[in-house]
């Protein structure tokens, strides 16, 4: 059975452009419940750890520089089939390929600066929620 939690990150760029409110509104409108929320900033090595699966790929340096460049908002979101439903809400990695109305289509600037992250499997969702939040920070 699919899990009911996923990890979202409002990325640098979107935070800088004052899009925390509009993006959280879209998330709420789509029926996700915020179970934990944090405004923070990743160090370069923490961004590298979070995206370790992409190490060695051509975009890895730019991605991890970007993700550690300024503050982000991390959130644990709850809904049935959370991972798949949230990935539908955010749209394709490249905003030019993302469907109309998706968060990336609405708010992303480019394939790297693409406004928002969503976990890609239940297993990664658990790992990513643990990366950002301790047990006493989630409800
Ligand atoms: N990314 C990039 N160039 C690419 C592929 C990915 O800059 O060709 C960045 C982009 O910010 C993306 C992140 O790396 O969100 C992680 O890539 P993934 O393939 O996991 O995409 P996602 O699951 O975020 O859609």
Image: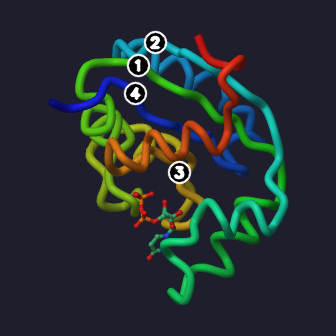
Q: Mark 3–mark 2 contact, CB under 8 Å?
A: no
Q: Which mark is residue 78?
A: 1
| Residue pointed to by mark 3 | 108
* Nearest to N terminus: mark 3 or mark 2: 2
Q: Mark 2–mark 1 contact, CB under 8 Å?
A: yes
| Residue pointed to by mark 4 | 5
Q: Nearer the viewer, residue 61 or 132?
A: 132
Residue drawn at 67 percent across, 39 percent down: 132
Residue 71 drawn at (x, y percent): 81, 44
* Nearest to N terminus: mark 2 or mark 1: 2
Queried on whether the Cβ of the residue with tag 1 lies below 8 angstroms from ligand 1, the answer reads no
Left or right position of 122 against 56: left
Residue 80 drawn at (x, y percent): 25, 19
Residue drawn at 52 percent across, 16 percent down: 25
Left or right position of 123 against 24: left
| Residue pointed to by mark 2 | 33
Left or right position of 94 against 3: right
On-image quarter of the N terminus: top left
Residue 20 location, quadrant: top right
- Give the alpha-carbon distance from disc 2 to disc 1, as whole Å: 5 Å
- Give the alpha-carbon distance from disc 4 to disc 1, as whole Å: 5 Å
- Give the alpha-carbon distance from disc 1 to disc 3, as whole Å: 23 Å
Q: Is residue 22 above or below residue 70?
A: above
Farthest-out residue, left:
1
Q: Is residue 138 above or below residue 46?
A: above
Q: Mark 4–mark 1 contact, CB under 8 Å?
A: yes
Q: Secondary structure at mark 4?
A: strand
* Nearest to N terminus: mark 4 or mark 3: 4
* Nearest to N terminus: mark 1 or mark 3: 1
Q: Secondary structure at mark 1?
A: strand
Residue 9 location, quadrant: top right
Q: Nearer the viewer, mark 4 or mark 3?
A: 4
């Amino acid at each position: 059975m699919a899990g009911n939690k996923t990890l979202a990150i409002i990325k640098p760029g979107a935070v800088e452009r004052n899009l925390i409110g509009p993006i959280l509104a879209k998330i709420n409108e789509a029926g996700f419940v915020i179970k934990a929320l944090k405004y923070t900033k990743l160090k370069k090595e923490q961004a590298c750890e979070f995206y370790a699966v992409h190490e060695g790929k051509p975009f890895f340096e730019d991605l991890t520089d970007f993700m550690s460049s300024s503050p982000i908002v991390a959130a644990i979101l709850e809904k049935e089939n959370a991972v798949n439903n949230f990935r539908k809400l955010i749209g394709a990695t490249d905003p030019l390929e993302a469907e109309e109305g998706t968060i990336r289509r609405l708010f992303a600037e480019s394939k790297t600066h693409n406004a928002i992250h969503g976990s890609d499997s239940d297993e990664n969702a658990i790992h990513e929620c643990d990366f950002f939040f301790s047990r006493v920070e989630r409800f």
